[in-house]
Structure formats: C-alpha cells, structure tokens
Image (tube, rainbow, N blue to C red):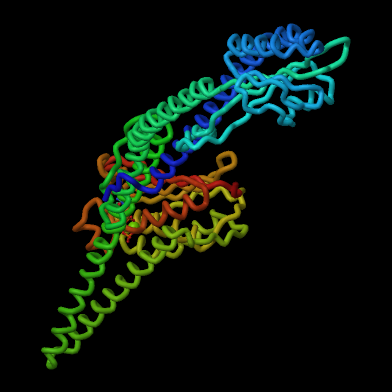
Amino acid sequence: MTNPFSSVRWKVLLAFFLIIGLSFLIMAGMLTNMLGRYLFEQRIRADRAGLEKWAVQAAPFLSAADTQTLTQTLAQAGNELSGRVLLLDGDGKVQLDTFREAHGRRLQYPEVVSILLSGQTADYGVHSLKTGREAQDSMLGFAAGDEWVSYSTAGIVHSSRVVGVLLLVSSVGEMMQNLYAVQDNLVLIFVVVAAVAILAGMIFSGVLTRPIVTLTGVIRQMSKGDFAARVPEKGSGELKHLASAFNSMSEKLQTLDQSRNEFVSNASHELKTPLATMKILIESLIYQPEMETQLRTEFLTDINAEINRLSAIVSDLLTLVQADAHTMRLDREKLSLAAIVKETAHRLEPIATQRGQTISLSLDDSGDMYADKSKLRQVVYNLLDNAVKYTQDGGKISLSVVRGGRDIILTVTDNGPGIRAESLPHVFDRFYRVDKARSRESGGTGLGLSIVRQIVTLHGGSIRAESEEGKGTSFIVELPLHKG
Ligand SMILES: Nc1ncnc2c1ncn2[C@@H]1O[C@H](COP(=O)(O)OP(=O)(O)OP(=O)(O)O)[C@@H](O)[C@H]1O
Ligand SMILES: [Mg+2]
C-alpha cells in the first residue's frame, strides 16, 4: 500500500514550509524597516531645513509682535512646506495657526517640550491620528486605517534666547501608503513563493520517499515468506547502498531458506527408508506366527540393524544442527593427534582385516595440541570409516600425522575406486553420496564428511580431498596446534 502523504513526507514538507516562512518573515521585516527608515530620514532632512529657514525669518517679527507680517510669513511657510504651520510662544501656547483652529491652546508635544526646555534647536516625531476611516489590517504590523502625521519643530531665537517654536504638521500618509504597498507586495510574493515551495517540496519528497515505500513493500512480501523479492538498485548514494545491502541480505535469507527446506526433506527421506524396511519385517513377524525360529532371528537381527542405522542418522543430524546453531562448544584439552589416530585405527582394524585390507600408520608424535578430543576422534573415525567402506577388499589404507610449521597435518589415503572430478567438490555437502545405491547399501547417509568439515572449521583448520578415479583418494586435514 503506498500512501502519498506518509508521515515522513508531511514532516519534511512542514519543516520545509517553516524554514521558508521564517526566513521570508525576517527578510520582509528587515526590508520594510530599512525602506521606512530611509523615507523618514529624507523627509526629516527636508522638513527641518525648511522650517529652520522660516524660523530665522519669523524671529524679528515675533519680537516686534508684528502679527500681520507673521501671519503672512506663516502662510507662505505652510504653502512651501505643504503642511499646517503653528507659531508657539515661549510657554508653548499657540499664537498663530494657518488652520486657525488652535489659537490660545497650549501644546505639550514632546517635540515642543524638547525645544523649550531641553534647548534643542529642532526636533521631529511621527504621530498617528485615529480617524473614523475603516481600518484594514495589513499583515506585517502597521495599521493601515491610521492617519499618520509628522510634527517638526524649530526654535525661534532672538538675542540668543528661545522666544518661540515653529511647528509644522504635515501628513505622512502618502509615504505610509507606499510602505503598505511594499508590504502587500511582499505578502503576495510570499504566497506565490510558498505555493511553489510546497509544490516543489511535495514532488521532491515524493522522489525521496519512493525507494523507502518500495522497500517497505518488499519487506512485507518477504515477511509473507516470499524470499525471492528484491528491490531495484537504482539511483546513487545512501539509498542505493541501502538497496544493495538489503538485496544481499535477502539473498542470504533465500539461500538459508532453501538449504533448510532441502535439509528437512533429505533428513525425512533418510529416516523413511529404514522405517519402511522395519515395517515390512515387523508385519511379516506379526502375520506369520508359525515362522521358523532361524528366520525369525534373522528378521529381528535386520530390525536391530535398521534401528542402529536410525540412531546413527539421528545423532549425526543432531551434531550438524548443533554446529549450525553455533551451540557446538569445543572442550579443548592437551592431546596427541597421533594417539587418537592409533586408537581409531585399532577400533576399525577388525573390519579391515575381515576384508583383507591393510592399514599402515606413519605418525610424527612430536606435536601436542589443544583441541576437542571426542570431536577429533569423530573426524579420524569418519575419514577412516570411509576409506575402509569404499575401498575394495584387499585394498591399502595409510594414515599419516606430520607437523608443518604451526599446523599439524593428518592425511588419510586409500587405493580405492577414487572420486570423479565433478563429484569431488560436493563430497562435503550434506547428504551427498557419489554412488547413491552403493553407499546406501554400505550404510552411508552422506553426513560423515560434512560433520568432519564442521569440526575442522570450528578448530580453525581446513580440509581438502584429492582423488584420481581408479587409483585412490586422499583427505588432507590441517589443524592449528594452538587456537588463534
Ligand atoms: N575414501 C573414499 N573413497 C571413495 N569415495 C569416498 C571416500 N570417502 C567418501 N567418499 C564418497 O563421498 C560420499 C560422502 O561421504 P560421507 O562420509 O559424507 O557420507 P557417507 O559415507 O555416504 O555416509 P556417512 O558417513 O554419513 O555414513 C560417500 O558417499 C562416497 O561416495
Ligand atoms: Mg562416511
């Protein structure tokens, strides 16, 4: 199931959107701030220069109390500076107003106070006059419904004394409108950029998460038992590495699954044969109660042999399963491989003698080694047992133990039928028999050599087989004297 809006994608998109939104807000804020400051500064400079000029002109008329000339001068100033001009006396009381509204009122704006009390020559400030107009919010902070005005003041100085203040009230509404327009444009740009970013983010995150979605699908398939499923190893970088690592893991799982199935079916097959034989023998005993004693004993002996075979197979299987599960432990002790070889040869001597075979030993007793005695016994036994079993009557078998550097080398050689070159690489496989009919007859299951290889590997050694058809076979085992 592919969900195009998986949680990973949402998180990526959200992070994307947050980053863009935040950086945009910061940028827009800085931009309007800078622009506003620039516009105001231009305005202040112009207003101040104009007002100071008029303050100088008005000074002599104020001290002479020439109201008529003052009124004319103020009207001219108002025209030139395009605003409302007020003349205040030394107490901050309005003497003249080009709008003729505020006569006699005392104004205590900070811009006036700073001139009359703090001795500044000029000052400037921006104020908002709430009007009845409908307020429409611009998104970035200024209330667009306000009417903004600037108060510029300049001191009127006569004989080094501040005798009054000239106040210019002019609207900065147009300037503010320009700023709002910039803000509105920025909002528009933001909406467009955000839309494009989200679209790009969706496409991009889709491309990014698609391999993960595919991988999830394949994992689901595998958990249902389909180990043949693989992910495409496309693209580059981490996702490709992930895909190829995943595929090699699936391959191993598939091999493991196959070999397990093979193992179980081979094992069942091996167990079925002796059970079937036993069933026939036992049924004969049941349905022929009058059977001769000699025949009965023969049947029972056969049943006993089959039971021995069954238990041998089961114990071999157990050994292999243990080694597979890595639960096989080595009980290392000081031992002599030569002694084990001597002992094993002695055990198998009677069978070999019966078949007219000779077993010769060539033992270099010098190397004591640290290894698991009972497991090495099994190695030597399985190899010698094969040599005796597969070599014709009257054949020659030789065993040798020599030291080679830090290793000890065991060789089991016979002059038997040998193993075909194409079969040689498989003799260590589980349940593998070169000649199925013949070795089944001689009691083989095909587990002996795979157990040998497991034990040798566990000891840190190696094993190989050399053979020539019709001439004989050699198994060469190299074991380290000490572990590590
Ligand atoms: N010395 C040998 N000469 C010729 N063929 C051999 C020799 N040793 C092993 N083989 C071949 O290799 C096969 C595998 O040997 P392996 O010991 O694993 O199984 P097995 O002897 O058939 O059964 P098991 O040892 O489990 O009773 C044998 O079936 C046999 O065909
Ligand atoms: Mg064998």
Depth check, front residue: 308 or 400: 308
Q: Is residue 126 left or right of residue 389?
A: right
Query: Residue 100, how many percent across, how many down?
Result: 62, 23
Query: Residue 233, how many percent across, how many down?
Result: 32, 35
Residue displayed at 30% across by 48% down: 3
Residue displayed at 47% across by 51% down: 456
Depth check, front residue: 430 or 264: 264
Q: Is residue 439 left or right of residue 283?
A: right
Residue displayed at 65% across by 18% down: 85
Q: Is residue 421 above or below residue 293?
A: above
Q: Is residue 341 left or right of residue 193?
A: right
Residue 320 visible in the displayed image: yes
Query: Residue 410, how many percent across, how many down?
Result: 48, 48
Residue 345 visible in the displayed image: no
Quadrant housing residue 350: bottom left
Residue farthest to the right, as pictured: 160
Quadrant housing residue 171: top right
Number of marks = 0
Q: Quadrant of ligand 1?
A: bottom left
